[in-house]
Amino acid sequence: MPRRHRPPRRKARNAMNDATPTPNPHPDPAAPRVTREQDRAPIPVSVRVFIYVVGVHVFAGFLYLLFYLGASK
């Protein structure tokens, strides 16, 4: 049975690699903040929630109007 070919192993990354930037201990307060994708909900979800909330309130207002008009007669 022939041996399978293995891909070569990657070299271990050095902790003091020049390609990785070191964090700035004193960030510039005027610099724009970078938000990460994990920190906030995706835009379509927040838009959907807004539409649902507005839609439920409109529907509740319509029901309130129906009861108001029904009680007035």
Image: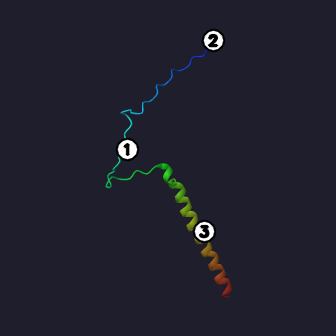
* Residue drawn at x 65%, y 79% as measured from the top left: 66
Which residue position is annotated with label 1? 23
Which residue position is annotated with label 3? 56
User: Which circle marks residue 40 in the picture?
Assistant: none
Q: Which amino acid does label 1 sit on?
A: Pro
Name the quadrant containing residue 23.
top left
Closest to the observer, 46 or 32? 32
Query: In the picture provided, is 39 more to the left or to the right than 25?
Result: right
Asked if labels 1 and 3 touch by Cβ distance under 8 angstroms, the answer is: no
Q: What residue type is labelled 3?
A: Val
Distance from disc 2 to disc 3, alpha carbons, whole Å, reads 67 Å
Q: Measured along the vertical axis of the image, is residue 16 above or below residue 33?
A: above
Distance from disc 3 to disc 1, alpha carbons, whole Å, reads 46 Å
Which residue position is annotated with label 2? 2
Q: Position of residue 64 (x, y in %)?
A: 63, 78
Closest to the observer, 47 or 22? 22
Query: In the picture provided, is 38 more to the left or to the right than 30?
Result: right
Q: Measured along the vertical axis of the image, is residue 7 above or below residue 44?
A: above
Question: In front: mark 3 or mark 1?
Answer: 1
- Which mark is first along the chain, 3 or 2? 2
Name the quadrant containing residue 5.
top right
* Residue drawn at x 50%, y 50% as measured from the top left: 38
